[in-house]
């Protein structure tokens, strides 16, 4: 009688249903771990490995990468926007400061020694209840 000696890598696997411990080939086990397909214990219990399939894991990772990329883009856009706003405000403040230094009204460009009086006289709508220019 001819015999062939082969070596199979068996992994101990316990059936979650009946508790039977049996040997499952490592290749098959890895397969079922990856594809989440059903397998059966020696007593015929239908089992499968829970969790996500490899395809699902890859999809989740891709989704996470996409979300991180979107987040980075939004942060960069916001930083750009802040920079533009800040630059515009600096320009505005500089213009107001220059006008104030010249004693020039910021609304009508008139130069006046008494700007408070000028504003009260000429731009009453710019003065609020506390008598302060708004
Ligand atoms: Zn079983
Ligand atoms: Zn004025």
Image (tube, rainbow, N blue to C red):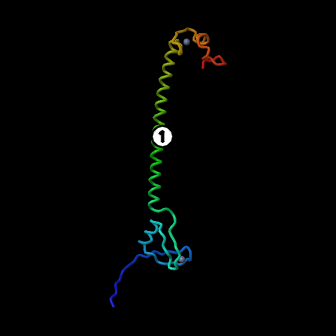
Residue projecting furthest to the bottom: 1
Residue at x 66%, y 18% (from the top left corner): 130
Residue at x 46%, y 32% (from the top left corner): 83
Q: Quadrant of the C terminus?
A: top right
Q: Is residue 36 above or below residue 119?
A: below
* Residue 45 rendering spot, x and y as whole percentages: 53, 76
The secondary structure type at the circle numbered 1 is helix
Q: Which is nearer the eye, 117 or 77?
A: 77
Residue projecting furthest to the right: 129
Q: Ligand 2, what quadrant?
A: top right
Question: Mark 1 — residue?
Answer: 75
Residue at x 46%, y 77% (from the top left corner): 23
Q: Quadrant of the N terminus?
A: bottom left
* Residue 40 rendering spot, x and y as whole percentages: 49, 75
Q: Is residue 129 above or below residue 59?
A: above
10 Å neighbourhood of mark 1: few (<14), some, or many (≥20)? few
* Residue 47 rendering spot, x and y as whole percentages: 52, 72
Residue at x 44%, y 46% (from the top left corner): 69
Q: Which is nearer the eye, 42 or 19?
A: 42
Q: Is mark 1 within 8 Å of ligand 2?
A: no
Instruction: Give the left or right position of residue 18, taking residue 81 as reference.
Output: right
Residue projecting furthest to the top: 113
* Residue 129, quarter of the rendered image: top right
Q: Is residue 66 above or below residue 130?
A: below
Q: Which is nearer the eye, 113 or 77?
A: 77
* Residue 111 rendering spot, x and y as whole percentages: 52, 9
Number of marks in picture: 1
């Amino acid at each position: 009688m001819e015999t062939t000696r082969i070596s199979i890598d068996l992994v101990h696997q316990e059936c979650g249903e009946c508790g039977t411990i049996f040997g499952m080939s490592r290749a098959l086990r890895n397969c079922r771990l990856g594809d989440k397909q059903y397998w059966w214990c020696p007593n015929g219990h239908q089992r499968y490995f829970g969790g996500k399939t490899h395809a699902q894991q890859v999809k989740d990772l891709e989704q996470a990468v996409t979300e991180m990329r979107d987040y980075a883009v939004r942060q960069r856009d916001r930083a750009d926007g802040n920079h533009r706003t800040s630059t515009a405000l600096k320009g505005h403040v500089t213009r107001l400061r220059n006008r104030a230094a010249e004693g020039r009204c910021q609304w009508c460009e008139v130069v006046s020694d008494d700007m408070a009086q000028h504003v009260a006289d000429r731009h009453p709508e710019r003065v609020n209840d506390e008598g302060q220019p708004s």
